[in-house]
Amino acid sequence: MVYAGASEAKITPYDSQFLYGYPHVERYSNGVHDDLMTAALYLEEGRNKLLFISNDIIFVTKVMAKEIRTIIGKETGLREEQIMVTATHTHSGPITVDAANSTRDPIVPKFDRKYVAFAVEQMAKNGIAACKAKIPATIGFATADSTGIGTNRRDPDGPSDHQVPVLLIKDAKQAKYLACMMVVSMHPTVLHEDSLLVSADFPGMAKAYLKEHVFGATCPILYHSGPCGNQSPRHVVKANTFEEAIRLGHILGKAVESVVDNVEYTDDVSLEIRRTFINDPPRKVFPPVEESEKKLEAVVAKIERMKAEKAPAAQIRTVECDIFGAEEQVTMSMMQASGDLEAFFTVNVPAEIQAFRVGPWWFVGWMGEIFVDHALAVKKALSGTFIISMANGELQGYITTEEAAAEGGYEASNSLFTPQLGKIFVNATLDLIKK
């Protein structure tokens, strides 16, 4: 017999907030397009208990995750390894972390401690509510196809993962939906720096579609961001508008809708929890300041040539991001030279890997923005294993591949750790699950 409880609550800011995700633009919100939500799913089978918490924010830091777990633990008795706290990674929500690569950006402020305290309290209270709402339940498993919401960021034909695991929870007695949970590997960046409205971006639109057409208005929906470090909607959107965010959200919502009717449900679902840590992730050594400045000059010259040649907008956007990365690399080189970078390394270690088994599936939480290639390597070795990124903390940048590092684009330029960390994540996960 399995028990489940679910709950959701708003974490929409109550005042104007700096919307974080793009550099050099003063982006204080002047309204709300759609609410930011925290959603929680509690599962219990025998002595095994676990809690998923998904949040419409750009990052959950290690400090935030620790506070949320502590509050919930005091009230429910759950240990921190039984609680997974994730971020959907919306770029149209409040800043929640002080990032090393933004320290020289005069426009990006420090995170608002009052908002973060409010969000942490809401996330914790909502998680407790999910635990207290437990009733006998049944669980169904389905996979949807997210093709159409985006592609590989740098190469539309490059590695992507459009398989969306969908966990469906029903009341065992009334067969009413209690919750839905999905993992989607795509950057939620339809909306760009010109938007000043708070929004969950297309994941919020997908959840709204599913509430209206499938699950009902009161059914909590958990959206976790799978590895999307090199995934983006930029090659499929017609514009960076709310209309396009809604269109992509509906593509995803309809994909999930198409698979729910044929799902078989069972109350015979076992649960398992495992956890490990990477205590000394390999650090990146940045070039001298002069070398980083020359790289920036080269990328600026490249985009001027592309604009003169009237290159496609998506290609220009990729190189615009490369400029952001080159600027941030200059910052990192300066901080390395001054010794100021050390604090940003230490605050993010050890790196946590958390694995929840729900029946035949493993959901594995990794910190940071991960390239999808690493998740595909895990999935190739262990089918039915789904990586959730930005779980229980962040890593001050991307975990890229060796190939991306050699190319030297945006993601690799500001990464705090080397691409080898991705392979370490993969091997540690395989060891954790196979043991």
Image (spheres, helix red, strand yellow):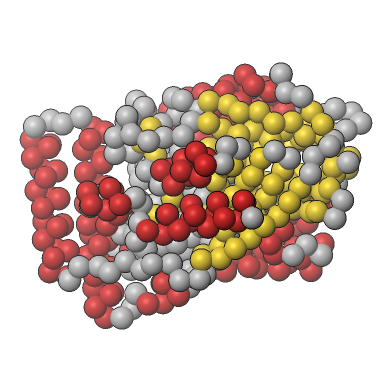
Question: Which residue is most to the front?
Answer: 435
**Vertical comparison of 272 with 166: above or below:** below
Quarter of the image for residue 263 reads top right
Quadrant hosting residue 282: bottom left
Q: Which of these two is toward me, 60 or 430? A: 430
Q: Position of residue 429 (x, y in %)?
A: 55, 53
Q: Quadrant of the N terminus?
A: top right
Left or right of 95 in this view: 301? left
Give the side of residue 233 with respect to residue 50, left or right.
Answer: left
Q: Position of residue 421 (x, y in %)?
A: 41, 59
Tell me the residue at 22%/35% (across/down).
315
Res. 269 in view: yes
Q: What residue sits 41% from the left and 35% below the top?
A: 160
Residue 228 percent across, percent down from the top left: 44, 43
Residue appearing at x 79%, y 54% in the figure: 49
The image quadrant where one finds the C terminus is bottom right
